[in-house]
Image (cartoon, grey):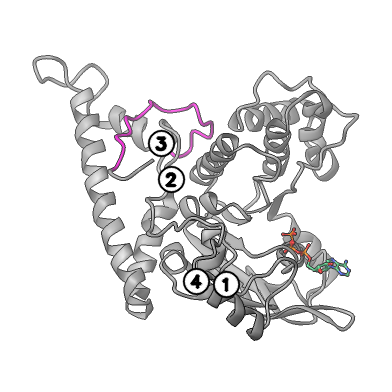
Amino acid sequence: MGVEVAVHELTKTFGSQTIWGDVTLTLPPGEVSALLGPSGTGKSVFLKSLIGLLKPDKGSIVIRDVDIARCSEGKLYETRKLFGVLFQDGALFGSMTLYDNVAFPLREHTKKSEREVKSIVLEKMDMVGLAGAEGKLPGEISGGMRKRAGLARALVLNPEIILVDEPDSGLDPVRTTYISQLFLDINAQTDATFLIVTHNINMARTVPDNLGMLFRRELVMFGPREVLLTSEEPVIKQFLNGNMNGPIGMSEEKDAAQMAAEQAMFAAGLRDGGEEVGGVPPQMECSPGVPERKAVERRRQRVRDLMHTLPDAAQDAIKKLMADEDEHRRKVEKATAEMDLDDSGNPRDGANGEDANNNNGNSNGGGRHSGAPRPQPTPSGRG
Ligand SMILES: Nc1ncnc2c1ncn2[C@@H]1O[C@H](COP(=O)(O)OP(=O)(O)OP(=O)(O)O)[C@@H](O)[C@H]1O
């Protein structure tokens, strides 16, 4: 299972500029979390602080009992091996083939033979859907493929924490959805803890288990995604609706006087440019054939435990989604059972007992193409 990342009262400044202060959040092990925030609020600085590339001024980041905000260089080096990072453009070496790019961390940080390197590189390239493209140069492929190659490289050392910086930058909406599903597939196959920094509202609404937002030099909120998606907090509503009506301004936050003047204009009918996107959509699923994410059941338990601490609107949304999800599972199980029966209602060869379990429940298969594809009925309301 991925590891927990516990951030406590973290503060980062550059000179007299406080980027954010007293940030406290815990990335639950093996779950997918996303961090939102207007441009310049320090999301990338936060990612860099998590991997120890930037030193915070105050607070702690505890991973497996090591506080990487103040540990020795040796411990930091060791702890960094738990991380895989996908930078915005994939950060590939332009003169190397995709194969050599993906092999790079293995050749740099391990003593594996070229045969072992090849087996790992091919496995990870397959996981990200790039099998066959090993000989290409980064300049010969699309931006989306470069990101996937960067992801394959981030995976070769089997990271337990995967950080992703703005995966949607430069991608069209369809490719953004594909890469979002790839993150969930990889989460299912590795059970690694994910943190995705994004501006993409659709991704934020449908992909993560948990959602947070940075604004005005602080973490406005962090928790199960239903909490942010049902929040009445003006900055969160404004961001999720992508409109001009709220505290986020053109280049910085608005002051009270400007807010009041604008409110009057919006009330008088000035259009705010956004489109109201209310409610909590169902979470995206993994690709057919990929084992279920282990995080799903753990998160359910965790959310049930903290349910009483959540706002009413979030509780209602969680209960409804859980009921829908149960119904969806029942349909999938029924369809799977029907698929495993012949016309006379008898189990088909190999579809009984252990064999059937292996096909559906094998989480050690690694590749996204392993295991029999499962039917995936679409839950109601899914786009
Ligand atoms: N090494 C540095 N030295 C000084 N200031 C820095 C440094 N790195 C980042 N900053 C400042 O920190 C602030 C936050 O930057 P950051 O790139 O983390 O924002 P962001 O939220 O990721 O923005 P975007 O969404 O536009 O990528 C900016 O004002 C930036 O200029």
On screen, residue 86 versus residue 348, left or right, reads right
Identity, as a three-letter code, of the amino acid under mark 4: Ala
Earlier sequence position, callout 1 versus callout 2: 1
Which residue is labeled 2 in the image? 284
Residue at the spot of label 3 = 362
Q: Does the magenta stretch include residue 125?
A: no
Circle number at residue 268: 4
The answer to which of marks 2 and 3 sits earlier in the sequence is 2
Badge 3 marks a residue whose secondary structure is loop
Query: Which residues, given as a range, are shown in magenta?
Result: 363-379
Give the mark nearest the N terminus, 1 or 3: 1
Please name the predominant secondary structure of the magenta segment in the image.
loop
Mark in the foreground, 4 or 1: 4
* Residue to which mark 1 is pinned: 246
Q: Position of residue 165 (x, y in %)?
A: 70, 53
Which residue is rendered at x = 34% and y = 30% of the image? Answer: 374
